[in-house]
Amino acid sequence: MHRTPQITIRQRRIEYSLQKSLLWSSDSSHTSWRFTRAAARESVAQPAVSAQIRRLEAQLGEPLFHRDQRAVRLTAAGAALLPHARAALAAADRGRNTIASLRGLLQGRLEVGVAGPVDHRFAEALGDFHRAHPVVEIALSQRQNEPLLEAVARGEVDVAIVGIGAQPVPSGVRTRVVATEPLVLAVRNGDPLSRRKTVTLAELRERAMITLVPGSGLRTVLDHACREAGFTPQITAETSDLASLVELAVEGIGVAVLPRSATDGADVTVLRLTRPRLRRRTALAWNEAATSPAGRALLALADERFDSAPHA
């Protein structure tokens, strides 16, 4: 009688190690990745890893790595498989951490993303979390607003600080506003507008403007507001951080729409924006279905720091 071979725990461990090896090989700092190094990293014998990779390649009908005498690199097929391996590992980690949380133990890794400066209250919530759960590794990364929201939607980031405005939030992502601030116009001292207190957005139609790069929350708000006002802004310079934006405004490279707090102490003239009144809203973002137990614990602590209701 034919018996179906049973998949052993050892085989599952090898498959898990293969998935982790695929993820490690995607790191640009390890372009000369070797099977032996990956095997040692995962405490699995190198022949077992190599054999499992060959079996997987045979099943898929495509090579996953370019091999030479010194190193191996991902093929196009390997790169295509990579996000699925990442998703499988993330699901396995969430499952393991969820079971641990039932015993009252939080462990694993908390993925946190920020788009722009970290609100001091969020920093305090992170500090509260670290003191309450010191064994959880906190990984903090900075990205542009739209890619960060997409990472939250994919379940790659547990909790993020993002800017929300006119752009739709990806499906499955929840947000909670933690800070609201008016946007103002910063101009160089001596600029013709510097003698005024207020300005409308429409009056900036012919002015050279400097702003953040596409994908940032501030840029999205500005682009949407200009479209609503019936014009395309004349962008002469883009930067990825507010401090550089202020410095460019000081030198008169262009006028800048930015949060009021960013101009504190800067040698610029600040005008209130009217018609429309623009605001920057900073929010916590998370994926209800994918956030880890550690992420949910951070959100609970954030509830104690921020007094805002969630938005679907």
Image (spheres, rainbow, N blue to C red):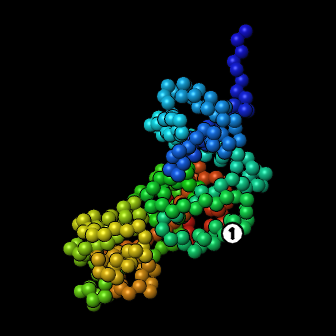
User: Could you tell me which residue is drawn at 33 percent across and 79 percent down?
Assistant: 249
Query: In the picture shown, does residue 145 fall above or below 10?
Result: below
Among all residues in the image, which is located at the extreme right?
A: 103
User: Which residue is nearer to you in this view: 142 or 132?
Assistant: 142
Q: How many neighbours does mark 1 have within 10 angstroms: few (below 14), some (14-19), or many (20 or more)?
A: some
Q: Which residue is mark 1?
A: 128
Q: Nearer the viewer, residue 193 or 89?
A: 89
Which residue, as the protein is rendered here, is positioned at the far top? 1
SS state under label 1: helix
Q: Is residue 283 visible?
A: yes
Compared to residue 92, the image places residue 63 above or below, namely above
* Quadrant of the drawing holding the N terminus: top right
**Place of residue 97 in the rendered image (x, y in percent of width and height, measured from the top left):** 70, 49
Q: Residue at x 73, y 32 (%)?
A: 9
**Residue 232 place in picture, x, y as percent:** 24, 65
Q: Could you tell whether 32 is left or right of 17 in the image?
A: left
Q: Nearer the viewer, residue 258 or 296?
A: 258
Residue furthest left in the image: 206
Which quarter of the figure has residue 185?
A: bottom left
> Based on the displayed image, in which of its 4 quarters is residue 207 positioned?
bottom left
Q: What residue is drawn where x is 72% and y is 54%?
A: 107
Q: Is residue 164 left or right of residue 268?
A: right
Number of numbered discs overlaid on the protein picture: 1
Q: Amino acid under label 1?
A: Asp
**Residue 183 is at least partly visible in this image:** no
Measured from the top left, where is residue 259 in percent x and y?
42, 76
Q: Is residue 75 above or below residue 224?
A: above
Q: Quadrant of residue 248?
A: bottom left
Residue at x 72% of width, y 67% of height: 131
Residue 87: image location, x then y, percent: 56, 43
